[in-house]
Image (cartoon, rainbow, N blue to C red):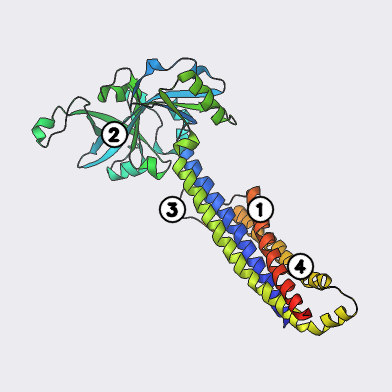
Amino acid sequence: MINIISGVSVFGILISTAAMVIILSGFNGIENLVLNMFNAFESDIEITSKSSKTFDRNFISQDVLEVDGLVNYSEVIEEIAIVKNQDNFIIGTIKGVEPQFLSMCNMDDHLLDGQSILSDEYGPLAIIGAAAIVQLDGFIFEIGRQYEYFTIYAPNKNEKISQNQLKNIDAFTTAQIPIVGVFTFNNKVDQDLMIVPIDYAAEIFNYKNEITQIEMDFEEGINLDEKKLEIEQIIGENFQVKTSFEQNQLIYETSKSEKLITTILLSFIFFLATFNMVASITMLVIEKRNNLKTLQAMGAKENQLHKIFFYEGLLINGIGLVGGLILGYAVCLLQMKFGLLGMHNSAIDYFPIAFKLQDLLLILGITMIIGTIAAFLPSKFLIKNIIK
């Protein structure tokens, strides 16, 4: 009977440990996927004005654009406008960029249809998010040089919008632009973003030398926090410099909070699994009560008797821990190799898995601490009571 309970104890610890490995590794995979989706579109460093939405591009020192490690940069004009196609319209974000921006965000890798260009010999062109073009009921022509034209209603900064529609004629600048491509990065970007040439954006929004931000890309492996400090020293206090982490800070913080809650829940599940081990040690002590008295009569000390059952608990915990790690990582490796669990209608074909050394150390810490306590307390108090 005790052997069966001990086996159940090992099995419970094994399964709960394997669950921690699988769930945390799956969580890492999803976390990396989401962060990569957002970081793919965000620049490494973004410069904006602290006091206003726009700033004069001439206020930016040339030294900022010549810092070591800088690969590329683009001036940006980003504004809200109404985008209309026939009877469909959305409140969208118009992002005017320089041509090099397309290579900065690896547009070719995220293009669903059409071309990743912003102009040709006939004039400016636009690329739009996948969700936005669906809402506008638009499409990309398969025949070359034939485009569908969307209408942009850009609000004039010096005019007020009135309830009287006749007075709103001058409140908007109306322009049309052909759509040549459709991209997908993430839901936030896909649902309302249209990318256009910066000169075209400046014209429809009535900008002269003003821009809303400068986006910069650096070499792989560059410490962005150090670059941020370097740029801040050059650019002065009137500008705000943000790294890609700070641009998506809410996503990072949310991800950390979710992982913390998940870890706490998994620790509680493991704690419940150790109750079987407590029961196993308790029954073993009760069954061997007479033997313990015999050993005591032969000169065994209380501490020595306690260690017998304490080590028994550690053995149960250790076997379950090792088995759980082997099972958990085996399942994860099979998922990575064969894609056992698919993700239909998603950016990837199967559920992502990622390993982190700190997760392994965390699992070892949780299981060893809780397991040691669960082995120590019952054996200590039961032995003391039996001797008394």
Residue named by callout 4:
315
- Count of all numbered marks drawn on residues in the image: 4
Tell me if mark 1 has few (under 14), some (14-19) or many (20+) residues whose alpha carbon lies within 10 angstroms of its own: some
Q: Who's the residue at 29% across and 37% down the image? A: 92
Q: Amino acid at mark 3?
A: Asn
Q: CA distance from mark 3 to mark 2?
A: 30 Å
Q: Position of residue 308 (x, y in %)?
A: 81, 72
Indicate which label's residue lies in the foreground, 4 or 1: 4
Tell me if mark 2 has few (under 14), some (14-19) or many (20+) residues whose alpha carbon lies within 10 angstroms of its own: some
Question: Is 212 situated left or right of 317 in this image?
Answer: left
**Quarter of the figure with the C terminus:** bottom right
Residue named by callout 1:
360
Question: Is 381 situated left or right of 227 in this image?
Answer: right
Q: Tag 2's secondary structure?
A: strand
Q: Earlier in the sequence, mark 4 or mark 1?
A: 4
Question: Is 125 situated left or right of 368 in this image?
Answer: left
Q: CA distance from mark 1 to mark 2?
A: 46 Å
